[in-house]
């Protein structure tokens, strides 16, 4: 329970030989040991046992089997599990040169400095003053008939003051500053995680675009060969001109798709330069193919209850909720009286060399009480606004948690479906390859023409492009799982 002590007038006496401030020290300690407003407690963890309705522990497909294992921790350098030196170098390059990270680090330093500045309220405030003036004094101001006088006045003084934080408003304010610094720290961790995920995704996309461009150009050469053969057949009267027109349309469509693929590959290269804090012309992109990127076989499996203790965006929302909770205490303390203790002492003299003489010594000890009486309801509604902000932060926190769980569930389902898609596309590639092999054997036997080989080869390349796209999506969804689980940057607490 918090109590208040009425203090009035100026205190400049001793009782029983003990300074009054010393006599009141136990009471002051008691008064300053309480703080109004709610004491913050961490939100409870969600009472759910799994992310999705069915728990599938492995995702098998040609090219690799992925297994979820609780024994595998989420590492802070999770991108190294893809076994690609180019990806490792790109992530390291971005983590050291990214402009957004640089700004986030500066924001974190600013929050820490504001916290240290706010903690200064717990110490007495000491100020010193010195002055020199020349004055013309008229005794008529005091009702004395005397001629005015001109004199110099030299002063040297010091003031010390301390506000008793009886209701804990200042402590709640510092608590809010500490929580704000925590929020900024987790925001920086979330930036690290997002940056790494964006870099890895961009590298995978760039490799997929390069492979798709190469496969498309091979198809273009095959269609061009089909056009030449069909034109020869038309000249010999063995085929209609419409067949040539159809192949020319297919050829033009394929040729038109290459610039779009090259544009998207260039955009990923420019994005990688941006993420690394470079201009596009300053970054040279090494050649990269999907075959250079390994599919992580064993993936971390975390309990749903631990997700809220490791994802930086959830921890940031929790810290923001803490700020709102402390702000309620600040607004509540503003409704109660505030007590300030102050003391000042100084030296006055009309001559500089005599400054410090006993005749010019002055001092003052004061205890003051300031109590809100009428503010037009401003303080009351400011507290209500703080409570509303706290309720808003609670809703935001719950929303962030729900979104996080949905993201994990999405990625788990995506990995399951990616494995199914890759498996189907692999069958399509194998079927197209077998069909091409059989047609080549028939061609050697003289039962089919070369044009059928080119058509079957084109179908094979189309199936391979679809397989490349499915494989790239599987890799990117693996990246999404690492990011959804928090990336290991924040240890579970």
Image (cartoon, rainbow, N blue to C red):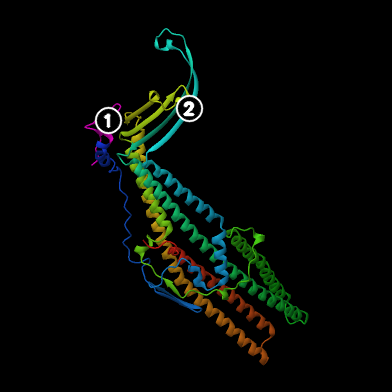
Instruction: Tell me the quadrant of the picture where the C terminus can be found.
Output: bottom left
Q: What residue is at 40 percent from the left and 36 percent from the top? A: 126
Q: Which mark is residue 131?
A: 2
Image coordinates for residue 201, horizontal then vertical, percent: 54, 65
Q: Which mark is residue 7?
A: 1
Residue 409 visible in rendering: yes
Image coordinates for residue 308, horizontal then vertical, percent: 37, 60
Dot 2: element: strand
Instruction: Tell me the quadrant of the picture where the N terminus can be found.
Output: top left
Q: What stretch is highlighted in magenta?
A: 1-21
- For mark 2, does the 10 Å Cα neighbourhood hold few (<14), some (14 to 19), or many (20 or more) residues? few
- Can you tell which quarter of the image residue 461 is in? bottom right
Judged by depth in the image, the label closer to the viewer, 2 or 1, is 2
Q: Which of 126 and 316 is in front in this view?
A: 126
Q: Does the magenta stretch include residue 17?
A: yes
Q: Is there CB contact under 8 Å for labels 2 and 1?
A: no
- Can you tell which quarter of the image residue 287 is in? bottom right
Residue 387 visible in rendering: no
- For mark 1, does the 10 Å Cα neighbourhood hold few (<14), some (14 to 19), or many (20 or more) residues? few
Image coordinates for residue 70, horizontal then vertical, percent: 38, 72
Q: Which of 204 and 278 is in front in this view?
A: 278
Q: Is residue 424 magenta?
A: no
Q: What residue is at 67 percent from the left and 65 percent from the top? A: 259
Q: Which residue lies furthest to the left in this view?
A: 16
Q: Residue furthest right?
A: 235
Q: Is residue 61 left or right of residue 273?
A: left
Label 2 to label 1: alpha-carbon separation: 32 Å
Q: Is residue 296 above or below residue 374?
A: below
């Amino acid at each position: 329970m918090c109590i208040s002590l009425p203090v009035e007038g100026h205190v400049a006496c001793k009782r029983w030989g003990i300074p009054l401030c010393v006599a009141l020290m136990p009471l002051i300690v008691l008064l300053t040991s309480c703080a109004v407003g709610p004491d913050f407690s961490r939100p409870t963890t969600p009472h759910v046992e799994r992310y999705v309705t069915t728990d599938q522990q492995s995702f098998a497909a040609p090219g690799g089997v992925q297994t979820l294992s609780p024994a595998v921790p989420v590492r802070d350098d999770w991108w190294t599990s893809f076994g690609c030196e180019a990806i490792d170098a790109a992530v390291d390059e971005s983590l050291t040169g990214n402009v957004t990270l640089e700004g986030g680090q500066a924001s974190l330093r600013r929050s820490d400095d504001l916290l240290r500045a706010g903690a200064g309220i717990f110490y007495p405030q000491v100020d010193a003053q010195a002055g020199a003036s020349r004055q013309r004094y008229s005794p008529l101001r005091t009702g004395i008939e005397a001629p005015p006088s001109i004199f110099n006045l030299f002063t040297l003084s010091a003031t010390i003051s301390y506000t008793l934080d009886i209701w804990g408003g200042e402590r709640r304010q510092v608590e809010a500053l500490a929580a704000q610094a925590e929020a900024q720290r987790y925001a920086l961790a979330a930036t690290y995680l997002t940056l790494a995920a964006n870099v890895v995704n961009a590298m995978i996309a760039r490799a997929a675009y390069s492979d798709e461009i190469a496969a498309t150009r091979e198809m273009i050469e095959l269609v061009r060969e089909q056009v030449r053969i069909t034109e020869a057949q038309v000249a010999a009267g063995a085929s209609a001109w419409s067949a040539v027109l159809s192949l020319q349309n297919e050829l033009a469509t394929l040729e038109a798709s290459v610039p779009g693929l090259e544009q998207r590959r260039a955009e990923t290269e420019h994005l990688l330069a941006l993420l690394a804090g470079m201009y596009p012309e300053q970054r040279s992109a090494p050649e990269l193919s999907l075959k250079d990127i390994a599919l992580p076989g064993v993936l971390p499996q975390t309990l749903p209850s631990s997700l809220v203790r490791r994802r930086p965006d959830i921890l940031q929302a929790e810290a923001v909720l803490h700020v709102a909770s402390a702000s309620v205490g600040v607004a509540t303390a503003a409704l109660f009286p505030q007590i300030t203790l102050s003391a000042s002492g100084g030296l006055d003299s009309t001559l500089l060399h005599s400054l410090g003489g006993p005749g010019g010594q002055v001092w003052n000890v004061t205890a003051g009480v300031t109590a809100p009486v009428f503010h037009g309801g401003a303080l009351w509604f400011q507290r209500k606004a703080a409570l509303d902000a706290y309720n808003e932060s609670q809703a935001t926190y719950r929303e962030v948690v729900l979104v996080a769980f949905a993201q994990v569930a999405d990625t788990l389902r995506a990995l399951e479906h990616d494995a199914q898609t890759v498996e189907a596309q692999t069958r399509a590639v194998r079927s197209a390859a077998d069909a091409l092999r059989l047609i080549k054997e028939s061609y050697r036997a003289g039962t089919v023409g070369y044009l059928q080989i080119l058509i079957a080869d084109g179908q094979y390349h189309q199936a391979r492009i679809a397989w490349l796209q499915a494989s790239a999506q599987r890799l990117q969804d693996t990246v999404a799982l690492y990011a959804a689980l928090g990336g290991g940057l924040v240890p579970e607490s």
